[in-house]
Image (cartoon, grey):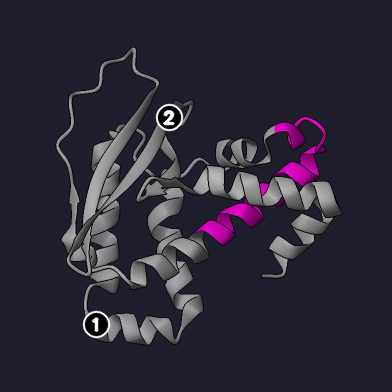
Amino acid sequence: MADNNLEPFEMIVISIDSMNKHLGDKKNKERLNNDKKKLYSIIDQTLSPYFQKRYAGRLVLNQHWKNANNDQRQRFTEGLYQSLVRSYALTLLNFDISQINVLAHLPITNEVKKITVKSEVMYRGELIPMNFSFGKFKEGWRFYDVKIEGVSYVKNYRNQFNAEISATGIDAVIDRLETM
């Protein structure tokens, strides 16, 4: 269970420390690359306390959200989250997590409802920006999007799923997500 009093900056630092502990050395990464179930479990445990699944699902479904029933919304949201966990996990295997630097931030005032926590990671000699979009929800601060090199997971998935839903329908997309 996440501490609802943590600020976004603290959540990212805690998550990175946890991932570094589990994925930090090359031997662990090789082992986890061969045990995807364990890898996904580590990423899920690290991200889920701080991630707002429903809001991310709503942003991705975009105009399809209003036409989806509650069961479709819930199943899509969970499938999307699991897809994000898998994608993020595989991406992190390629990064030296100890080289993720969370950039300085300004204090957050009560009026602020959304914030971006900026970080960067050294990858093959190049500094790659990795930014986390947070919103203030009833359960406290939660992130709902990750942008790596300026590419938003939400926008990327929205474009992908919009075309797929238009072609095959939301139930087909949900079925595919659930069987991945």
Position in image of residue 43 (x %, y %): 41, 63
User: Of residues 119 and 35, which is closer to you in this image?
Assistant: 119
Tell me the residue that label 1 is attached to.
Answer: 26
User: Of residues 117 and 78, which is closer to you in this image?
Assistant: 117
Which residue is painted at 40% across and 46% down in the image? 147
Is mark 1 in CB contact (under 8 Å) with mark 2? no
Which residue is painted at 66% across and 70% down in the image? 180
Position in image of residue 104 (x %, y %): 14, 36
The magenta stretch spans which residues?
Answer: 63-84
Residue 61 sits in quarter: top right
Q: Mark 2: give few (<14), some (14-19) or many (20+) Cα within 10 Å.
A: many
Q: Residue 65 carries which label?
A: none
Does residue 106 sit above or below 20 in this rendering? Answer: above
Marks counted in the figure total: 2
Q: Is residue 71 magenta?
A: yes
The CA span between labels 1 and 2 is 34 Å
Q: Does the magenta stretch include residue 142?
A: no
Visible in this render: residue 112? yes
Visible in this render: residue 141? no
Position in image of residue 1 (x %, y %): 41, 47
Residue 174 sits in quarter: bottom right
Q: Residue furthest left?
A: 104
Secondary structure at numbered mark 2: strand
Question: What secondary structure predominates along the stretch shown in magenta?
Answer: helix
Position in image of residue 72 (x %, y %): 78, 46
Does residue 35 sit above or below 136 in this rendering? Answer: below
Residue type, label 2: Gly
Tell me the residue that label 2 is attached to.
Answer: 135
Residue type, label 1: Lys
Q: Residue furthest top?
A: 111
Which residue is painted at 81% across and 46% down in the image? 166
Q: Which of marks 1 and 2 is nearer the N terminus?
A: 1
